[in-house]
Image (cartoon, rainbow, N blue to C red):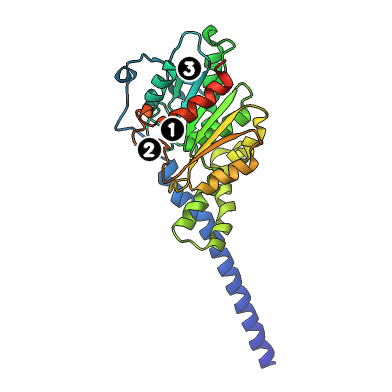
Amino acid sequence: MTVYTRNSKKKRIVTISVWVVLIVSICVLVAVPPIVMNDMLNVRIDFRHMYKAEDYGITSYDARLITQDGLEIATYEVRVDDPKAIVMFLSGIHNPSVTAFFGHAKLLQDNGYASLLIEMRARGESEGQVIGAGYLETLEVQAAVDYLKSKPRYEDVPFVVFGLSMGGATAINAIGQIPALDALISLSAFSAWEDVFADNMLDMGAPRFYVWLQKPFVRLYTTFKYGFRSFSLRPKDQIKLLGQRPALIVHSTADHQVPLANFTRLMENAPVHVESWVREGDHHFIINDDFLHPESDPEYVQQVLAFLDQHFGQ
């Protein structure tokens, strides 16, 4: 009787211990995403540096658009007579301001393309207190499309969405959701928010098994934070909806912010006609030296203009 009681107590202790470890482990997995991402996403970015079209010898026409969830978004339009296409620019998660693309707008204007620079939510002159991680910012692109479609000067003009980093991921999500978009250029985009989260954990030395366990909880957190609609808004899924529309996906081999594995996942899911360019080295902004003046990088300019002219230059 005594032996049986002792064995039963041992079994209960082991069972309780296992459950305690399991519950604590799940609590840790649930807690990590909000702890890590709080300062990254629950923040408003007031840029130290905002750029002006006049600094590039061009004129911009400012417009404030309202998204479907009620935020006022700042945009800057650079016009061209009889444009071949209009390119909508989106910047990264925390920097730079989209006004850093005025150099691109100047380059495109010189080559017959109009531009619309979209300052995404919670940045610069746009409203908002929370960054949408590429899930909510598709609403900014939809508002921009609606705005451009209302202007007679853009009747029958193709719409190209062009994003950098998180803006690149947003651009891919947007073209998967918005049929009116005619083409995509994406620089240094992540394949999914949980992918880049996990990739950076691995780079910091976290055990691969732990990272594998953590990914579903990251996705659970973003779904809870941004709504059920966000569950399917992953660039590696949305790129499958591209159809026959042209796209250029660009990355660098040693990108320390968004590792190359993200590019690989995107291209594995992309339609076969999607074009790509991979630059050697750690170039998250792709341009070698001066992002503000893309003309300083002839190879980059050639890649972008060749893609646009191939599809819209006739």
Question: CB of mark 1 within 8 Å of CB of mark 3?
Answer: no
Label 1 vs label 2: CA separation?
9 Å
Q: Position of residue 48 (x, y in %)?
A: 29, 33
Q: Which amino acid does label 1 sit on?
A: Glu
Report crowding for label 2: few under 14, some 14 to 19, many 20 or more residues within 10 A (C-alpha).
Answer: some
Report crowding for label 1: few under 14, some 14 to 19, many 20 or more residues within 10 A (C-alpha).
Answer: few
**In what element is the residue under mark 3?**
loop
Q: What residue type is labelled 2?
A: Asn
The structure residue drawn at horizontal position 38% and vertical position 32%, both measured from the top left corner, is 297
**In what element is the residue under mark 2?**
loop
Please name whichever residue, 269 or 305, is drawn nearer the observer in this view of the structure.
305
In the image: residue 20, left or right of residue 77: right
Residue occupied by mark 2: 288
Question: CB of mark 1 within 8 Å of CB of mark 2?
Answer: yes
Q: Which of marks 1 and 2 is nearer the N terminus?
A: 2
Q: Above or below — where is 223 with respect to 35? A: above
Which part of the image, by quadrant, shows the N terminus?
A: bottom right
Residue occupied by mark 3: 113
Please name whichever residue, 28 or 103, is drawn nearer the observer in this view of the structure.
103
Between marks 1 and 3 in the image, the one whose residue lies nearer the viewer: 1
Residue occupied by mark 1: 299
The structure residue drawn at horizontal position 44% and vertical position 46%, both measured from the top left corner, is 255
Q: Which quadrant would residue 78 be assigned to in this image?
A: top left
Between marks 1 and 2 in the image, the one whose residue lies nearer the viewer: 1
**In what element is the residue under mark 1?**
helix
Q: Is residue 129 visible?
A: yes
Please name whichever residue, 197 or 249, is drawn nearer the observer in this view of the structure.
249
